[in-house]
Amino acid sequence: MSSVPTEILEMLGQTMAKVVPVTIALALLFSVLSHFWACNLGAPWWRKRELVTDISYWFLVPLFARVFRIALLVLVAALLFNIGDADDLIAFYDDGHGPLSVAPLWLQAALFLVLADFMMYWLHRMFHGGGVCKYHAIHHSSEDGDWISAARFHPVNLLLGTIGVDVVLLTAGISPNVMLWLGPINIFHSAFVHANLNWDLGPLRYVIATPVFHRWHHTAPNVGGNTNFTGTFPNWDILFRTFRMPENRLPGHYGIDDQASFPGGIGGQLAYPFRK
Ligand SMILES: [Zn+2]
Ligand SMILES: [Zn+2]
């Protein structure tokens, strides 16, 4: 019989076994693409400032997200549905529940993608309301944004973002099996929009978030940074009038206002919102 620490170790091992090959593939892909189509000239991603910080987030965030997603799902099932037994818990979440779980899996995946993107749009706007919130400032603190900066998020930002949204939709009944498709798509797409690429995908810029679209979001507010909040489908930004893609120009400078006093290491960054 396996104990809880053994199970946690196994889970960490499984997560790492997925993350390592994906990381190598993305590193190779974006090294080649940004060699030919860089948005901003300069050192390649592996010589960027705070690389160790970004790599630390890259490997820690999937572990954190997995553990907290499961913990929150257990908590919500206990509080809202009075489910405490392990077998009942598995039966409840395993293949979804209620009317949503009856729909074909592709439809559930599409629904998950669109609803999650809509909720994330508003949560992201909330984090930018009245200046960039300290928890979200960590994501904006990289001055050399690249694919490896995609995971630079404070845990509170993750809980009130992707983890919270996942828990809401899985609790609503969508099958967690949608993650088999959406998980890899989301990892690739979030690395893609942060990559140092000058791609705006022409007319598709209105359909799907691109590197140029998201790099504008990482610029200072007076240059256009308080725009392009959407993660996947820019239609939310178009609909709510926050879309910004200047013609014949590329975003150039990234970071936050108090860059000079902002900690560069992951420890200092995690403590940053609680400091002042
Ligand atoms: Zn932001
Ligand atoms: Zn970003």
Image (spheres, rainbow, N blue to C red):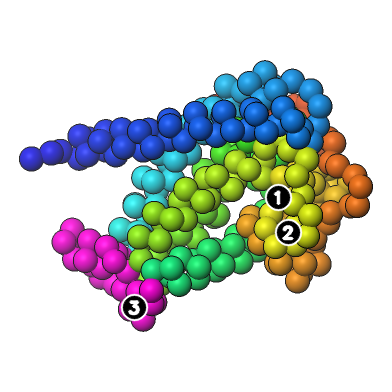
- Residue located farthest toward the top when viewing the structure as drawn: 47
Which mark is nearer the camera, 2 or 3?
A: 2
Q: Residue 82 in magenta?
A: yes
Q: Quadrant of residue 179?
A: bottom left
Alpha-carbon distance for marks 3 and 1?
33 Å
Rendered position, 41 above or below 246: above
* Amino acid beneath label 3: Val
Q: Secondary structure at mark 3?
A: helix
Residue drawn at 55 percent across, 44 percent down: 188
Image: magenta residue range: 77-104
- Residue located farthest toward the bottom when viewing the structure as drawn: 99
Q: Secondary structure at mark 1?
A: loop
Q: Secondary structure at mark 2?
A: helix
Which residue does the numbered mark 3 point to in the structure image? 102
Alpha-carbon distance for marks 2 and 3?
32 Å
Which residue does the numbered mark 2 point to in the structure image? 204
Which residue does the numbered mark 1 point to in the structure image? 210
* Neighbours of disc 1 within 10 Å: few (<14), some (14-19), many (20+): many
Q: Badges 2 and 1: C-beta atoms under 8 Å apart?
A: yes
Alpha-carbon distance for marks 2 and 1?
9 Å
Q: Residue 111 in magenta?
A: no
